[in-house]
Amino acid sequence: MRIETCYFCSQPCYPSKGITFVRNDARVFRFCRSKCHKNFKMKRNPRKLAWTKSFRRAHGKEMTVDSTLSFAARRNVPVRYNRDLVATTLKAMQRVSEIRAKRERQFYKNRMRGNKERDLEADRKLVAENQHLLPPAEREAAQKLLEEDESEMLDVVDELDEEEEEELEKQQLAQQKLKAKKKQRLVRGSGPEDMDVDA
């Protein structure tokens, strides 16, 4: 039993389900439902429709680079039956599904974390712009919180600046070493010899 993928939305097309369209040049297009078939006939681009997998992949909403995804592609090679091989394959499939679920969970958490940070920034901005609408007691508390946030941000920026300065110093040292090597020339029989170069 072969499970095909829908040409338009990349969902699985099970046997005896969906629509198969064969073009004049003998190319076969399989669709999981009439919705995909109609959109294909209307010449719509699946990358521009938010409900397709290609849209999700193109907009960073789906895990595209994952080594466990290629495991399913290797299954279709016919191999002579071997009981030990079947047992190890079943174990491997369970392990791969566990790893895939763990990676998907982590990917989802990372994606949602960005949304929460964006929401927090929007909330802070809203409070900062509309402080005159708050009651006097809450106004002072909000002001203190905003000042604390700004001081924390400044500390983080200072730490980042120090790290960048250290990296710049390392790069400058590496460039000086390269220049020193370039100023030397090899003399046959003796070795490197310093050249008179105005830098």
Image (tube, rainbow, N blue to C red):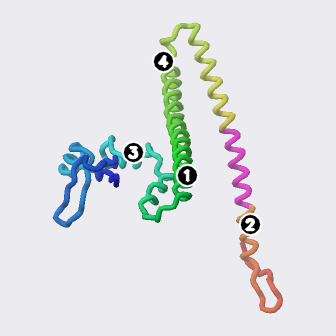
Q: CA distance from mark 4 to mark 2?
A: 53 Å
Seen in the picture, residue 69 relative to 131 is either above or below; the reply is: below
Q: Which residue is mark 3?
A: 56
Q: Quadrant of the C terminus?
A: bottom right
Residue type marked 2 = Gln
Residue at 49 percent across and 33 percent down: it is 115
Residue type marked 1 = Ala
Circle 4 Cα neighbour tier, 10 Å, few/some/many (<14 / 14–19 / ≥20): few
Q: Which residue is mark 4?
A: 130
Residue at 50 percent across and 34 percent down: it is 112
Task: Tell me residue 179's x, y (percent).
Answer: 72, 71
3 vs 1, front mark = 1
Q: Which residue is mark 2?
A: 176
Circle 2 Cα neighbour tier, 10 Å, few/some/many (<14 / 14–19 / ≥20): few
Q: Secondary structure at mark 4?
A: loop
Q: CA distance from mark 1 to mark 4?
A: 57 Å
Label 4 vs 2, first from the N-terminus:
4
Please state which of residues 110 and 116 is positioned toward the viewer in this rendering: 110
**Cβ atoms under marks 3 and 4 closer than 8 Å:** no
Please state which of residues 119 and 138 is positioned toward the viewer in this rendering: 119
Task: Tell me residue 33's x, y (percent).
Answer: 24, 44
Q: CA distance from mark 1 to mark 2?
A: 52 Å
Which stretch is magenta? 157-172
Q: Secondary structure at mark 3?
A: helix
Task: Tell me residue 138's x, y (percent).
Answer: 57, 10
Q: Which residue is mark 1?
A: 92
Q: Which label number is shown at residue 168?
A: none
